[in-house]
Amino acid sequence: MGMTDIVNYTAQTTVTDVSNHTAQLAGVRCHAEHHTNTRCLATHPANMRTHHLAKQLFTLVLAGLLFAAALPSIAHAATDFYTTWKDYKAGESVEKATWNIVSDGIDQALEAGKELFKEGDLKAAYDAVNAGYYGFYETSGFERTVMGYIGNGRVSQIELQFSAAKAVAKKEGSYEDFVSEVDKLSSMIREDAHTLDGTTPDGSTTAGDGAGAAGAAATFAACFGIIVREGVEAILVIGAIIAYLVKSGNQKSLKSVYIGAALGVVASFVAAWLLDQLKLSNAAPQEIIEGVTALIAVVVLYYVSNWMLSKSETEAWNSYIENQVASSVETGSSFALVFTAWLAVFREGAEVILFFQPMLAGDNINMVWAGFVVGCLVLVVIFIAMRFFSVRLPLKPFFTAMSILMFIMAISFLGSGIKELIEGDVLTMTPIPWIPSNEVLEVLGIYPAVDTVVPQLILLAITVVIFVVQKRRAKSVSSSGGASTGASPVETATA
């Protein structure tokens, strides 16, 4: 029975009861007046019309009251939604999850956000989009699976689209702009869901045995991709430090680097455990921690990059070696080595651990471990190659290459660190529509946002100035027969 039926039924029943009661009274009056030949008022045509109008008026008033009383519940139902993937699975009785079902969960949050924005509750609309990201996209493993199977560039596109939708609500933009950004986001997520499930919009499978095989392949690729991608970044930093120590004759300090890396692994597990216990994993605080860690790494990498560039000339390097004191790699400098190696591992480690948590709780567990093991083997090969072949390079190409590598990583970490702060709601994104989003730019940490590009351009300008100054200084030193003996990162720490 619909709302209209309920209203009509209630009104009809009530008015009928009143009419019957009126008729009974009228009958008594008519019986009393019968002996005096007085006409019965209840059966007078004018009174009958009045009774009919009263009945209609009563029906309209009652219908209005019932509809007004029902409005709050109707509005609440339109904006009610599940805020987490866990609640959605339980509420919708999901037995075997697919990525399209996860996409359905995200859609119900985004649709509620549009209704809330339309009602003028921009804060609630903002929270609904946030629920789609933190409550579904991250916690379900969707993000990491896309990262490994489709590409990290695609993940950045989705994340920035989430930020674009939230920015409209935060800046009190128009309803049309909000709907446009949300619909675009929903379409992108649905497209990825079909890719991961091996299905098409019409429900058919794209190849093979369908979603099962596609899901297994996606899981393996995701786990392999994440461990290799994050591991390589740490290995590049640690490998450069090790190569420097070997070339400078400080092999005894290699132990400090390995200790720092091991402590980074331990700290990663501790951080992941704390984030999970405090319910901060897959939430804004996690993004903020990752962003701040990345920005600290920028400072360290940029300093090391400039120092290595200053030693790219053979004369400068030989002078540095000759003037090094025996205690140049003692307590204070060992701490610097430990900290740098620790930071390189910790920045990537906690994220990797949090990535594997939802994957191990889902299907295709064998593929999770297969991807992890194969990825670790690849990292071992990369580390051995860098460890034993980089030290064979001539001095100038070695330090020039290492300096460029450190600078590129500093630029990349600066962009990714600021992007994490945007995702953590510390900053509000200002998009740049004409900058594309692809895997190459993703590696460089270049995103279509003013918030990331402007700081990177400033850092690039500072680097150009430093490069020109160092080149002029090197020519001056070379012509005078001397050389600069600038302090190394470890010497600076000792001082």
Image: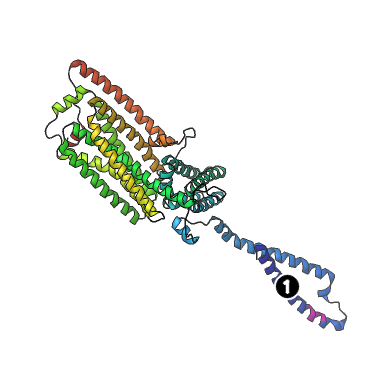
Lateral position of residue 150 relative to residue 40, left or right: left
Considering every residue shown, the one lying at the far bottom of the view is 35
Q: Residue at x 49, y 46 (%)?
A: 195
Q: How is the image coloured?
A: rainbow
Element on which disc 1 rests = helix
Look at 74% across and 76% down and name the residue there. Answer: 20
**Left or right: 183 as drawn, with respect to 215:** right
Q: Which residue is drawn at 19% across and 41% down?
A: 256
Amino acid marked by disc 1: Thr
Q: Residue lying at the far right in this picture: please name it.
A: 37
The foreground one among 229 and 336 is 229
- Furthest-front residue in view? 208
Q: Name the residue under label 1.
A: 16
Percent coordinates x, y for residue 174 in the rendering? 55, 43
Q: What secondary structure predominates along the stretch shown in magenta? A: helix
Q: How crowded is mark 1: few (under 14 residues within 10 Å), some or many (20 or more)?
A: few
Instruction: Name the quarter where the N terminus is drawn.
Output: bottom right
Question: In the image shown, does 362 or 473 lie closer to the viewer?
Answer: 362
Front in this rendered view, residue 377 or 435: 377
Q: Determine whether, in the image, residue 89 is placed left or right of residue 320.
A: right
Q: Is residue 130 visible?
A: no
* Magenta highlight on residue 172: no
Q: Quick check: 305 above or below 104?
A: above
The stretch in magenta equals 26-30
Quick one: quadrant of the C terminus? top left
Q: Quadrant of residue 382?
A: top left
Q: Position of residue 456 (x, y in %)?
A: 37, 32
